[in-house]
Amino acid sequence: MRKSAALILYATFSVCMKAQLPVSLGSAASFGILAGSTVTSTGATVVNGNLGISPGSALTGFPPGIVTGGSIYLADAVAAQAESDLTAAYNNAAGRACPGPPLPGDIGGTSILPGVYCNASSVGITGTVTLNGNGNPNAVFIFQIGSTLTTAAGNSMVKLIGGAVASNVFWQVGSSATLGTYTNFSGTIMAQASITANTGAALNGRALARTGAATFANNAVAVPAAPDAGPSVTCAYPSGQVGVAYSSSLVATGGTPPYSYSISAGSLPSGLTLNPSTGAITGTPTAAGSFNYTARVVDAASASATSSCGPLIVAPVQISGVPAPPSLILVLTALALTSVYMNRERLRRRLRRG
Amino acid sequence: MTRTRQAVIVSTAAALAACYAATLRGMFQQWSSDADMSHGLVVPVLALWIVWRERERWRALPAEPNRWGFAVLAAGAGMQLAAALGAGLFAGSVAFLVSVSGAVLCLGGVALLRAWAFPLLLTLFMLPKLAIVYNQATLPLQLLASRIAAGILTLAGMAVIREGNILDVAGRRVSVLEACNGMRYLLSLGFVAVVLAYLSDRKPWMRVALLAAAVPIAILANAVRVAAAGWLPWLAEGTPHAISGGFLFVLCLAMLVLVQRLFNKVYAHFQG
């Protein structure tokens, strides 16, 4: 509580001193994922925006990962320009004056007003950190973190209220950023080295890694809409399998956060449920089929948007993998048992003798 | 056995190994990499063990080299040439077995070949998959497994709809993949059936009878495994799937033993 109050007072003061302008990302703004060396995804990752790698070119996991509303650029001029613009943006964010005091090591549970915040070491988010725009739709939040940014596993969240929008939130990370499982994150991460998003993490923003790798596992990434744009919603991953845990997320952007999600038409596959406040769709499908649904998002100003999603195809159970132990194991087991069977009388006598 | 004869046998074996080195390497690679065929590693060991086990019997036979052996060797060489020209590993492997038989006939004669007939025939189980046959058999076996599994589930009182190799079990769809065609059970159980008959029964026809009985038992067992996976989804993947597969194979072996006893009873009845 004391930590929160101090931050609010400090931020109010800093806002009064000087309103911040957003960090200009240049051509990197259209990228949901940008990395210097490799991009790796396992499972159902959805990227709404461009995906680029430069100077590296190693892309793994697309497909099954999908890129919608954008293209993939590998070690080409577009990706190189985006990396160059990212470097400029990173330096710009890092060079903004930070009046202090430093951010606490864990900002989970705090409410933060617009401004520039810094910590020469590492910052964690356990639980929810609320970024309050204080009624200003152009409010800008810049976080300068010297080393690592880490969100705790299991539903950590960056919540935007009071007019704060994801496109005006910037996380400049001196080393690497890690989003814990099922984190609901907002803002543009600009990491000097690498970015890792663990299972189920959803990012209303960008994952931009200057020199290292960007690693994903069943994530949803949506490039944030311009501050004055109305709300929109990105659909969840379009396929699953009966009996196999499904995890994806609707991601809303634009309008005025926070958002409320719902299914306005059609239905999700049986076994899956939508979290109305985070957009996460999780569960284990119980029936195969093709499911069309309309995702609806309502923002804090009661503006709404819908997206026709689907078909979300749920494949039947597959009897997959090894159908039985290798024939060598089967045969050796059977021969051993045959040997016992052949020598059963002798074994019986020996057992009787003790 | 004279030293000259021993030298001839050793040099023949070395020549065969040298001529068929690439084929033997290919066979070993398939046994090592294909889980359906890994029992091939056991087959030559067991065949050699049987030869050793029967040594008293064949050592007593007089050595009567037979010139027809050269014809068989020539046939083997022709097949090996065809294999080298593109007929593939299967042809090369058959050529190897034909050549071994030719060498036995050349050096020991018809009586020795007859004495070694069973271990030589047993080595047929180490032949690599013949792709054309395997590919032709896969889909029918998949469909057969699906059909029998649907029947088993229906008998168990479950609502099942079958569309080809897809079973809809009470609203849950189960796809029977190519890997579940039952070929592994079929090959492994066939081999075990022949060995079981050899070890426990002196009647040569019993080997053929048990081999024939192994076919429906293996197909039925595979269908039971598919039905179990359809009924209990957790049995369809991973360790439980593998363990249930092994357990069912042991049951297959027990069924073979029962079938053998049944055959013996029927045989004894007709013998009076």
Image (tube, coloured by chain):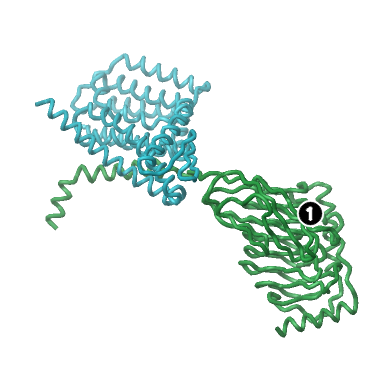
Location of residue B118 in the rendering, given as x and y in whole percent from the top left corner = 27, 28
Disc 1 residue type (three-letter): Phe
User: Would you say residue A34 is visible in this rendering?
Assistant: no
**Vertical placement of residue A22 versus A312, above or below:** below
Q: Which chain is cyan?
A: B
Location of residue B243 in the rendering, given as x and y in whole percent from the top left corner = 38, 49
Q: Colour of chain A?
A: green
User: What is the quadrant of residue B109 in the picture?
Assistant: top left
Subunit under mark 1: A
Quadrant of the snapshot with the C terminus of chain A? bottom left
Of the pair A146 and A150, the residue shown nearer to us: A150
| Left or right: B13 as drawn, with respect to A257 | left
- Of helix, strand and loop, which one carries label 1? strand
Residue plotted at (52% across, 21% down): B85
Farthest residue, direction left: B272
Q: Which residue is mark 1?
A: A31
| Left or right: A129 as drawn, with respect to B12 | right
